[in-house]
Amino acid sequence: MITGESAPIPKEVSSVVIGGTINLHGILHIQATKVGSGTVLSQIISLVETAQMSKAPIQKFADYVASIFVPIVITLSIVTFSAWFLCGWLGAYPNSWVAENSNCFVFSLMFAISVVVIACPCALGLATPTAVMVATGIGANHGVLVKGGDALERAQNVNYVVFDKTGTLTQGKAVVTAAKVFSGMDLGDFLTLVASAEASSEHPLAKAILDYALHFHFFGKLPSSKDGIEQRKDKVLSQWLLEAEDFSAVPGKGVQCSINGKHVLVGNRSLMTENGVTIPPEAETFLIDLESNAKTGILVAYDGDFVGLMGITDPLKREAAVVVEGLKKLGVHPVMLTGDNWRTAQAVAKEVGIEDVRAEVMPAGKADVVRSLQKDGGTVAMVGDGINDSPALAAADVGMAIGGGTDIAIEAADYVLVRNNLEDVITAIDLSRKTFSRIRWNYFFAMAYNVVAIPIAAGALFPFTGLQMPPWLAGACMAFSSVSVVCSSLLLRRNELEIASEMAPSVNCTPLSHIKIRYT
């Protein structure tokens, strides 16, 4: 079954199967164990609701101000009443200031009441949660699920974005582009040998090799209907594949097995070296050429002798180059992190415009790379596509799971980019920056309102202009300030981001002419 990871996942008796996934082979009998609020979809909805209700760290400032705001306002009200009453009792202002049907006590009390009424802690309290609620709603509409206000706040300071290569920058759809034999073996026999060795593997590269070998042997002989093709594939595969015994996968290196009683190796350089297989110079030259063109070389040995190799490419996502360029324009430094070899990694990085490349890094080492960037004072966002990236996603200041949606992706990442589109990385960062810019404006407005309104309500301008704010008008101003903050937060929906691309299209990656995001 296919999960948030881009590779097929084996399932056995009693294994958990996520609703909406695809069974690649065989027949399954499944039992529904979760319904309603227990399903993955319901968990995503719950995630959005939780994020909208969560507090960003900046909210602590508002909570602190609100905690001391009321005592300060009450104190100011008492001081206002006392000042006006004492001044009136001592004759410091003329009796004409007091209405005919009133007295000094009532005159002073009106100022004190207006101070209490016009003071508005509500605007301070609404500044952050309204903006966070609007932002998380906008994010959900764009396929960007935010785990909470703290994640939204951290994203505004991101200055490093670390991309996993396979399945993140690339499409995760491996295709064989070349096959060459460096021995006396026939090409058809070579493909049969490799396909037989890979038939028991569930790795995406194995499927690409099997498809290539199948089309080589049976090109033009398959039915046109999809169901017919799959039925015929199973039949023809069983006819020409050789029996592989003692099959085992070597993590990060390849596979090995026995065919016709002879040892078969299919994998990378490391697998060949460990088993004492010598790669001839002409094969090494061909391999270097493949890797220099962003292709992965798969080497094959039979009975201890090098036989040939295959070149496999994973096309880049169409938007990869323009997204990298867009991040640079936002002042963010992109980094590519991969377990692939250096030549392939550098070739891919060159196509998308990434200068900082970290290659031949195993899953556990990815988290170490993230921590090293953090030690240099960086705020790091990690963009990965599944389980293998979970340690790095958890170690990063902001973890973004591409094409996620499973429990594991939600647990490891702060953001889940459900559309599997790299543009959403820019959306997440830009939305965070615009949101907290709006929050800071909300705080400025709320503070400025109280700084200006309270002295006016206290009668600071009355001796010069005769302006006295009655309590009913003070209440209207207070309500208007709260409504203004809410409207200010809603203006986030009117923002947009547009980044034009200046990069020329490449062979494997055709960048969009621009990125244009409207938060409406």
Image: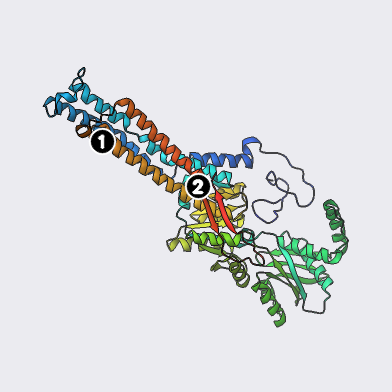
Q: Quadrant of residue 75?
A: top left
> How crowded is the residue under tag 2: few (<14 C-alpha within 10 Å), some, or many (20+)?
few
Q: Residue furthest top?
A: 101
Q: Give the x, y percent position of residue 145.
A: 56, 46
285 and 329: which is toward the camera? 329
Dot 1 lies on which element?
helix
Residue that numbered label 1 is attached to: 455
User: Of label 2 and label 1, which has the lower sequence position?
Assistant: 1
85 and 33: which is toward the camera? 85
**Amino acid beneath label 2:** Asn
Q: Is residue 314 above or below residue 17?
A: below
Say whether residue 72 is visible: no
Q: Residue furthest front?
A: 465
Say whether residue 483 is visible: yes
Q: Quadrant of residue 219?
A: bottom right
The residue at the point 64 percent across, 40 percent down is 39
Q: Residue furthest bottom?
A: 281
**Disc marking residue 495:** 2
The residue at the point 18 percent across, 20 percent down is 103
**Disc marking residue 469:** none
Q: CA distance from mark 2 to mark 1?
A: 35 Å
463 relative to 188 in the view: left or right: left
**Amino acid beneath label 1:** Pro
394 and 140: which is toward the camera? 140
